[in-house]
Image (tube, rainbow, N blue to C red):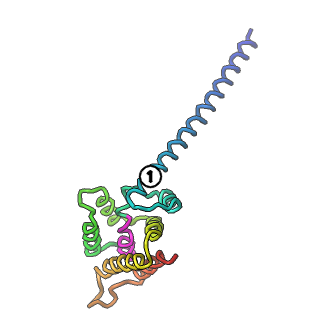
Amino acid sequence: MIKEEGLDYLAFDGRKLEDAFFIQRDKALIEKQRAMKSMKETKEGLAAVSGIRSEAVLQKLVELEVRPETLAPLSIIPLIQVAWADGSVSKKEEASILARAEAIGIRKESLAYGILKQWLQYKPPKTMLDAWVHYVRGMCEKMTVQEKEGMKKEILAQARRVAEASGGLLGVGAVSPEEKAVLSEMEKAFEF
């Protein structure tokens, strides 16, 4: 009798383990399905906000964890990176960046503006510049050579203005070597 009860107990435990295994597997599949749906929605949102249609560029932006709501501030990343190049953001650099943000339609009450304020307070990771590079390349796919050159000149001019905002003594040394390196890296984003 004890032996039979033990066998029943083991059989019960076996079913319990099997059920637990399948529950865990089902949970993993459900989670994977949610992640795929979320990725698809993110790609669609990024495409709607940016106009980028390249599946590869959209996929890279998703991998870099760029969300549709961060795409507007993403266009300001070159300015943020230049401001942080020397290790801190001056008040003049911050004012220059926020003025540019408002000029392109990022309003003070928006989530995008809040994100920019965070990036001005805490240096964003290098992956943000990587995301920007993919963003630029996606945008350039839809442009003529003249449009690409115009966008490149505009972005680099804005970034240089931020670099010069803190300035040096009588304009000498207005752009630090670190800022020059970031500007050079940005220029390379257009060379593909």
Please state which of residues 119 and 32 is positioned toward the viewer in this rendering: 32
Image side of residue 89 versus residue 22, left or right:
left
The residue sitting at 40% across, 76% down in the picture is 147
- Image x and y of residue 92, in percent: 26, 75
| In the depicted structure, whether residue 165 falls above or below residue 173 | above
- Image x and y of residue 24, in percent: 59, 35
- Image x and y of residue 51, in percent: 41, 61
Q: Mark 1 points at which residue?
A: 42
The quadrant holding residue 175 is bottom left
| In the depicted structure, whether residue 105 falls above or below residue 69 | below
Determine if the magenta segment contains residue 80: yes
The quadrant holding residue 30 is top right
The residue sitting at 52% across, 75% down in the picture is 192
Please state which of residues 172 and 35 is positioned toward the viewer in this rendering: 35
Please state which of residues 177 and 192 is positioned toward the viewer in this rendering: 192
Q: Give the range drawn in magenta.
A: 74-87
| In the depicted structure, whether residue 11 falls above or below residue 51 | above
The quadrant holding residue 80 is bottom left
Amino acid on which disc 1 is placed? Thr
Assign a secondary structure to mark 1.
helix
Determine if the magenta segment contains residue 43: no
Q: Residues within 10 Å of mark 1 (few under 14, many from 20)?
A: many
- Count the marks: how many? 1
Image side of residue 95 versus residue 88, left or right:
left
| In the depicted structure, whether residue 4 falls above or below residue 187 | above
The residue sitting at 32% across, 65% down in the picture is 121
- Image x and y of residue 83, in percent: 35, 74
Q: Determine the main secondary structure of the stretch shown in magenta.
A: helix
